[in-house]
Amino acid sequence: MDITNLRFLFYGYSAAWLIVILFVLLLVRRGSRIDRELSRLKALLADRQR
Amino acid sequence: MKRGLLAALSIARKDLKTELRTKESLNASASFALVILVLFSFAFDLDRESIYAISGGLLWLVYSFAGALIVNRSFARELPNDCLDVLIASPTPAWSLFLGKAIAAFFLLLIVEAISLPVFGLFYNISWTGVFWPLLLTISLATWGITVVGAAFSAVTVNVRLRELMLPVLLYPVLIPLLIGGMGMTTQLLSGNMAAADRNQYLRQLIAFDAIYTALAVYLIEFVLVV
Amino acid sequence: MREKAVYACAIAGIALMVWNLHTIFMGLPNDALQGFIFRIIFIHVPATIAAYCFYTVALVTSILFLARRNFVYDSISVACIEVATVLILVNLVTGSIWGRNQWGVWWAWDLRLTTQLMCFLLYLGYLLVRPAITEPTQRATLSAFIAIFAYADIPLVVMAIRLPNVRTQHPGPVLETGGLAPVYVAPFVIGIFVMLLIGTALILVRLQQESEQREIDSLRRELHAL
């Protein structure tokens, strides 16, 4: 088999991985933002109620 | 059922009457369609053969742009003075309100198309009078598809921020099968080589699209309007 | 509990995938016509099958939301649709690379490819329109409506290569016609499970975020009331 065939196989698999990894990074970033917001709001609420 | 249909007709009559008095979306949409037709003539430098080959695509792009402008106002028209809330609170069922809006938008878009079709024939040297009746059938079927889906998404996006942007984003992907059918049928009609098998295939595609989406929209609109 | 489920799904999915990759690259013979490249099928098709499973879940939960007005259903819908749309993107990109190698073009406008792209755009519209609606009940209702509308495209994609008189660039159905040689069936099926497990892990993470987001919203309201 010629080598271009293997190269395109490599492109295909790495593209698929890249997309999934990017999505996971996006999820993690959104998760940390939500966590920060949640703890900030909880602290604020505890502060107000005192 | 019968009362709902009558209510739908009176809603449609009301919409058409207000629109024909103010002509706000009609003027905007018709002039937009003409501007696009002029722009396309610069975009492509074509000989006679290839004009016929792209005629259907050209025509339906113009019509679907104009249609988005029309249906955008369909529900948004009722926002001032809280008319939409009153209409929803009235004993008219939601589906006949929606159907009335769709019928009104259908006739408005037909008016815009009736204005731009002769201009299209004139600018691009395409004769369409010979196939007028089959063309009218194609145009009516595809226009009903555009307006029924468009009115449904108009109801969805009426309270959304950036409504004018969101409607096309949602609308055009749904319309793809309809536009493929309409474009193919129109191109073959105008260039005069309509194969019977193709014609049946396109007609079936258009009718199936209209039937499925009309049923879906009429059935689901209750949940969207009465939130 | 939910965290454990996420880890279980992710670890099972990744372990299964590593084993499957080993079989795919070390154990399988090359395809007679396509050589190495056919191995993309073990990502390309399972990604779509898993995505359609998730879209179907989202369809059911969207209908349930309209019927019962419970926000849990809305969260499940959005989590499923987001992950499934990523999987559809994987399918489109790998398919495009495969097509470049085998057909010589990155993209062909045949019925299969067009309807699949349309599916991607429809659900992208769903994900784009959600943040634009501020009121939660309204957002959930309207997105459920859009999800049901968008699902009408999926039978079309499935039928696109099975209709009698449609010319397509895309190969016909290989699964039910026995076009897939018996040695390839096992890694293919395992590939589907890999995608389902990894997708489920991501969906569970997304669900957790949705419920935290709802908590944030209610805390905000509480703060506002004070």
Image (cartoon, rainbow, N blue to C red):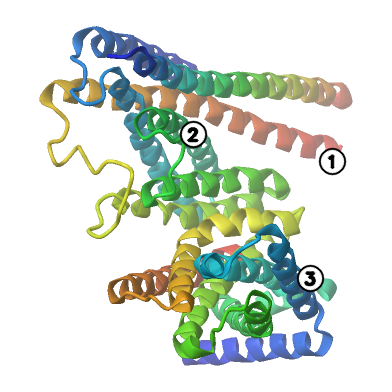
Residue at x 79% of width, y 74% of height = B28
Amino acid identity at mark 3: Leu
Amino acid identity at mark 2: Leu
CA–CA distance between discs 2 and 1?
43 Å
Percent across and percent down for residue C115 are 43, 50
Chain designation of label 2: C
CA–CA distance between discs 3 and 2?
38 Å
Which label lies toward us, 3 or 2? 2
Numbered circle sitting on residue B93 = none
Label 2 Cα crowd, 10 Å radius (few <14 / some 14-19 / many 20+):
many
Percent across and percent down for residue B33 are 71, 72
Which label lies toward us, 3 or 1? 3
List the single residue furthest toward the front: B47
Amino acid identity at mark 1: Ala
Q: Is residue C128 left or right of residue C184?
A: right
Residue indicated by mark 3: B79
Q: Is residue B27 above or below residue B146?
A: below
Camera-side residue: C188 or B191? B191
Image quadrant in which you'd find residue A50: top right
Counting residues from the start of the chain, the first of labels 2 and 1 encountered is 2
Residue indicated by mark 2: C89
Residue indicated by mark 1: C225
Q: Do the numbered discs 3 and 2 sit on residues whose CB atoms are within 8 Å?
A: no
**Helix or strand or loop: what does disc 3 sit on?**
loop
